[in-house]
Image (cartoon, rainbow, N blue to C red):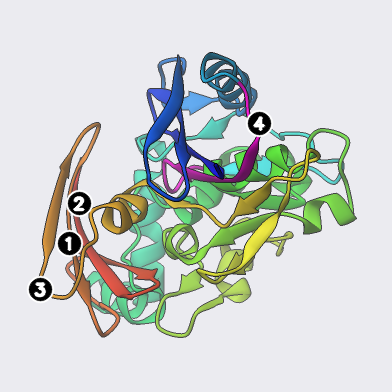
Amino acid sequence: MALVAGIDSSTQSCKVVIRDADTGALVRQGRAAHPDGSEIHPEHWWTALQEAIARAGGLDGVAAVSVGGQQHGMVCLDSGGEVVRPALLWNDTRSAGAAADLIKTAGGGDTAAGARYWAETTGTVPVASLTLTKLHWLAENEPENAASVAAICLPHDWLSWRLMGHGPGSGGEGLKALATDRSDASGTGYYSTADGRYLPEVLAASLGHTPVLPRVLGPLEAAGRTPQGALVAAGAGDNAAAALGAGARLGDAVMSLGTSGTVFAVSETPAADPSGLVAASPMPQGTTCRWSAP
């Protein structure tokens, strides 16, 4: 029997399920809570993951693992792979002013023009939850920390990286092992959903420099392997993973109510909504257009 493990690292907890890859049957599972708050040190996620894995009976015999996680959070690493400061989660709103500044600046003072620029350039109009707005806030409020940022990743990227044996003390080649998927990259604010590429000039304009960014993997690419040899898949943001899990196809709409509320549907063409209500998130079978509400 071939086993696969799915990990959901959400705002509130970490859940691990281990299933039979052939039948989908649940074999075992485990869960561990995350601390409350909108600013969390990533080590808490790693500790919770280890606890959830232990409660699921370990990963012995697991051939592949994939992480789905909360989107947008800002995880900053220095040149040695150490976390620069506690991660700002998607629900931390201190960067709301930075989002407004980014929109106004892009439009030369015209908010409507700025919103159009961001929608057409990235598929998403900046809001407080996006990674870019948090980095903009960091550069303005914690310049020493901003200058120390050698790599940026999102929560599920960081956990996948740790599962592959990297972590504090990893530098240089270790940081280059960071990987993400298109759904999480699309929520950063410095990735073009239409062109499928990072926008380093956009990132540098806010942070002041361009750090190492995770490789963006396609749906059939793997991030690497655990030290025990299990394949580590690209993973996904939580809502994108939910769309895949629900089997969403053209014409379907899926609603998710949790810490936030979202409605997503699948489109054959990238979204570019200047109202900011719809965000584009690339998926293997098309572009997932997402409507969100906190």
What is the C-alpha distance between the residues marked 1 and 2? 7 Å
273 drawn magenta? no
**Residue drawn at point x = 35 percent, y = 60 percent:** 126
Task: Tell me where residue 199 appears, x and y as whole percent.
Answer: 56, 75
Q: In front of the other: label 3 or label 1?
A: 3
Dot 1 or dot 2: first in sequence order is 1
Q: Is mark 3 on a helix, strand or loop?
A: loop
Which residue lies under the disc numbered 2?
Answer: 292
Q: In front of the other: label 3 or label 2?
A: 3
What is the C-alpha distance between the residues marked 4 and 3? 42 Å
What is the C-alpha distance between the residues marked 4 and 2? 27 Å
Which residue lies under the disc numbered 4?
Answer: 85
Q: In front of the other: label 4 or label 2?
A: 2
Which disc number belongs to residue 269? none
Residue 140 visible in this rendered orientation of the protein? no
Dot 3 or dot 1: first in sequence order is 3
What crowding class fits label 1: few (fewer than 14 Cα within 10 Å), some (14-19), or many (20 or more)? some
**Which quadrant of the figure contains the N terminus?**
top right
Task: Tell me where residue 20 appears, x and y as whole percent.
Answer: 46, 41
Dot 3 or dot 2: first in sequence order is 3
60 drawn magenta? yes
> What span is in magenta?
58-73
What crowding class fits label 3: few (fewer than 14 Cα within 10 Å), some (14-19), or many (20 or more)? few
Which disc number belongs to residue 277? 1
Residue type pointed to by label 4: Arg
Q: What element carries label 1?
A: loop
**Which quadrant of the figure contains the C terminus?**
top left
**Residue drawn at point x = 47 percent, y = 85 percent:** 195
Q: Are marks 1 and 2 in contact (CB under 8 Å)?
A: yes
Specify whether 43 is left or right of 2.
Answer: right
